[in-house]
Image (cartoon, rainbow, N blue to C red):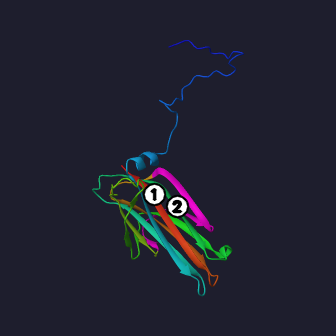
Amino acid sequence: MPNYYVFDTITKPVNVQMTNTYQNPGIIAPPENDASRSGRLFSIFGSASALVVSGLTSATISLLLSNPIGSGRTVYLSQINGSIGGSSLLSSLTGTMSMVKGGTLTSPATLTPANNNFGNVTTSTSTTQSSTGAITGGTIVASFQLAPGTFVQQFIGSIIVPPGSSISAVVTSSSSAVGLTMTSVLNFNWWEV
């Protein structure tokens, strides 16, 4: 190992040893970058709207991400994001978002996950569904109130869905302001290894 001066000199007030070079950068990227590059980062989207005619009205959207038994893959949840909004009178709009381990959707529709690497044709091994109804069963993992606007819950893989497991989430916006058209939006992003 070469001998370097431990103490700074007048001509070099800060001891500099180049360790973050182009060949060996000291940059760390989130795991989603590698997953997307490998064609293993996926997303689904759902939305629901409702017009308040009289009384308290809600717009509910639910998504379910299920990793089937025998898939051979483990699902790592990257993030859940979405929004609640309306055509006017947003001060009278309230909302909630809940995440559920397991759960069943009411009258579900099948969704096709999108590969977030647009140049890759790999398909997800997960099954996904959406519904404009509530989630039944399961165990609530998190629940919080929403204000009008967007929200993002980053997990960066900290929620793991092994084969034979599922996770679902529901966003509900509510208002009693007659004439308000409100919309609930929900997105899941995940990778599979």
Q: Which range is magenta?
A: 134-158
Query: Who is closer to the viewer here, 73 or 138?
Result: 73
Disc 2 target residue: 81
Name which quarter of the figure residue 115 lies in: bottom left
Is residue 83 one of those drawn in magenta?
no
Q: Is residue 157 above or below residue 131?
A: above
Binning the other alpha carbons within 10 Å of mark 1 as few (below 14), some (14 to 19) or many (20 upward) gives many
Task: Report how far apart the C-alphas of labels 2 and 1 lie in the structure.
Answer: 8 Å
Q: Please, what is the three-letter code of the amino acid marked with disc 1?
A: Asn
Is residue 146 one of those drawn in magenta?
yes
Task: Name the residue rendered at 61%, 80% in the picture.
Answer: 180
Where's residue 166, x and y in %? 39, 61
What secondary structure is marked by label 2?
strand
Task: Name the residue rendered at 38%, 47% in the picture.
Answer: 38
Horizontal arrangement in the rendering, residue 155 relative to residue 115 (left or right): right
Name which quarter of the figure residue 90 lies in: bottom right
Q: Please, what is the three-letter code of the amino acid marked with disc 2?
A: Asn
Task: Choose the circle earlier in sequence order: 2 or 1.
Answer: 2
Disc 1 target residue: 189
Where's residue 29, x and y in %? 50, 42
Q: What secondary structure predominates along the stretch shown in magenta? A: strand
Residues marked 2 and 1 touching at CB (< 8 Å): yes
Task: Name the residue rendered at 54%, 66% in the picture.
Answer: 97
